[in-house]
């Protein structure tokens, strides 16, 4: 695929999502075809949700500079908060996958989730 300006522009986003760039002729029905000035330039194949979660976990490890299991409790709680906001727990086996990456039990992940819910309710009650 040629280095069209559109390809260069969307590649960082596509990589961050764990998606795949394809030529427009390779597009299948579920792929997203992007056009530039009326011409199909590329297609983006989005990952399955479970693949996205794995990709997000790897990106979070890169961001922290260490395996997520080595983070302290407060950092792990923050990871769970971010993952919840990104829909990680709507994926089948999401809690188990995250628990494994964090090196904690499923029960601990649920406790972190419940803690965030309680904090959100408390802030709402205070009008924050």
Image: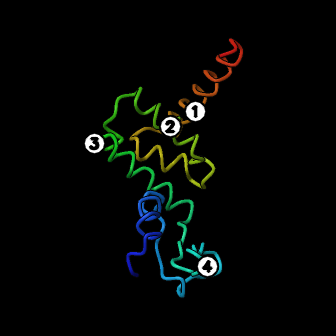
Q: Which residue is mark 1?
A: 113
Crowding near the residue tagged with mark 3, few <14, some 14–19, many ≥20 C-alpha atoms within 10 Å: few
Q: Which residue is mark 4?
A: 38
Name the outermost residue toward the front. 37
- Residue at image x 40%, y 46%? 101
- Helix or strand or loop: what does disc 1 sit on? helix
Name the outermost residue toward the bottom. 25
- Helix or strand or loop: what does disc 2 sit on? helix
Asked if 120 appears above or below 78 in the picture, the reply is above
Marks 2/4: CA–CA distance: 42 Å
Q: Which residue is mark 3?
A: 65
Instruction: Locate the C terminus and report the quarter of the image it occupies.
Output: top right
Q: Which residue is mark 2?
A: 80
Along the line of sight, the residue nearer the viewer: 21 or 46: 21
- Helix or strand or loop: what does disc 4 sit on? loop
Q: Of label 1 and label 3, which has the lower sequence position?
A: 3
Marks 1/3: CA–CA distance: 24 Å
Crowding near the residue tagged with mark 1, few <14, some 14–19, many ≥20 C-alpha atoms within 10 Å: some
Marks 3/4: CA–CA distance: 42 Å
Crowding near the residue tagged with mark 4, few <14, some 14–19, many ≥20 C-alpha atoms within 10 Å: few
């Amino acid at each position: 695929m040629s280095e069209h300006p559109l390809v260069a522009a969307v590649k960082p986003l596509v990589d961050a999502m764990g998606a795949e760039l394809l030529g427009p002729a390779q597009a299948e029905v579920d792929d997203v075809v992007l056009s530039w000035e009326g011409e199909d330039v590329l297609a983006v194949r989005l990952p399955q949700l479970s693949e996205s979660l794995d990709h997000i976990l790897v990106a979070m490890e890169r961001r922290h500079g260490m395996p997520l299991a080595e983070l302290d409790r407060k950092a792990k709680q923050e990871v769970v908060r971010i993952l919840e906001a990104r829909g990680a727990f709507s994926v089948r086996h999401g809690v188990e996958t995250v628990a494994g990456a964090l090196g904690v039990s499923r029960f601990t992940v649920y406790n972190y989730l419940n803690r965030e819910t309680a904090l959100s309710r408390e802030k709402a009650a205070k009008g924050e």
